[in-house]
Amino acid sequence: MPFVLLYLVVEIVALVALGSVIGLGWTLVVLLAGSLLGLWLARREGVRAAQALAEAVGNRRVAHAEITDGLLVAVGGVLLFLPGLVTDLAGLLLVLPPTRALARRRLVRAAEERSPGLRTARIRSEGPIVDGTVVDEPDTRPGPSVIEGAVIEGTVVEGVVIDPQDRRAG
């Protein structure tokens, strides 16, 4: 409830300030033009974000940036839909690609700070996906294992690499 009251006070102060500088008629024109331009941009950028997400999924790569962009465009569209000068400005900033990239970086950084393992997972997500089973039995063979001339120190995990394209739907 306090947030709604604060929102209303900020919007009224901004509208009165703009109206006192440029007049009521021009203030209404600015509000209408900002909303129309913002909604057009939100639609355009939403389609671009959806196409980028589809391309990332088609290329079988993690689409964290595309999903975050889509989310920010959606939030910007909601802000543009709400009446008011401040919400229109905030919505436009989230819809425009340069300022959206800044917001995305800050959002990702904040999420990484709250979850320390998230950064490591995002960095390691660029490699191939390998299906496997964890076996609790330790490797009892003595010495290092040799695979095609390379010496590997550590535990040997035996398994089969399954190509995702070879799987049959079922």
Image: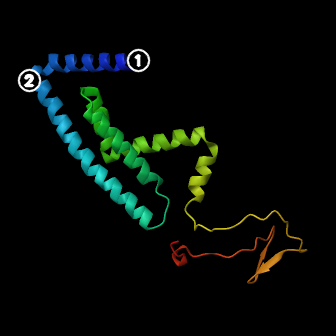
Q: Earlier in the sequence, mark 1 or mark 2?
A: 1
Three-letter amino acid code of the residue under disc 1:
Met
Q: Quadrant of residue 76?
A: top left
Indicate which disc residue 49 carries.
none
- Residue located at (25% from left, 51% from top): 44
The percent coordinates of residue 102 (x first, y second) are 40, 43
Give the residue number, with chain letter if any, for mark 1.
1
Instruction: Give the colour scheme shown.
Output: rainbow
The percent coordinates of residue 86 (x first, y second) are 28, 27
User: In screen coordinates, is 61 left or right of 131?
Assistant: left
Three-letter amino acid code of the residue under disc 2:
Gly
Farthest left residue in view: 25
Give the residue number, with chain letter if any, for mark 2.
25
The correct choice, above or below, for 164 with respect to 72 in the image is below
Tell me the element at label 1.
Answer: loop
The correct choice, above or below, for 83 with respect to 59 in the image is above
Residue 158 visible in image: yes
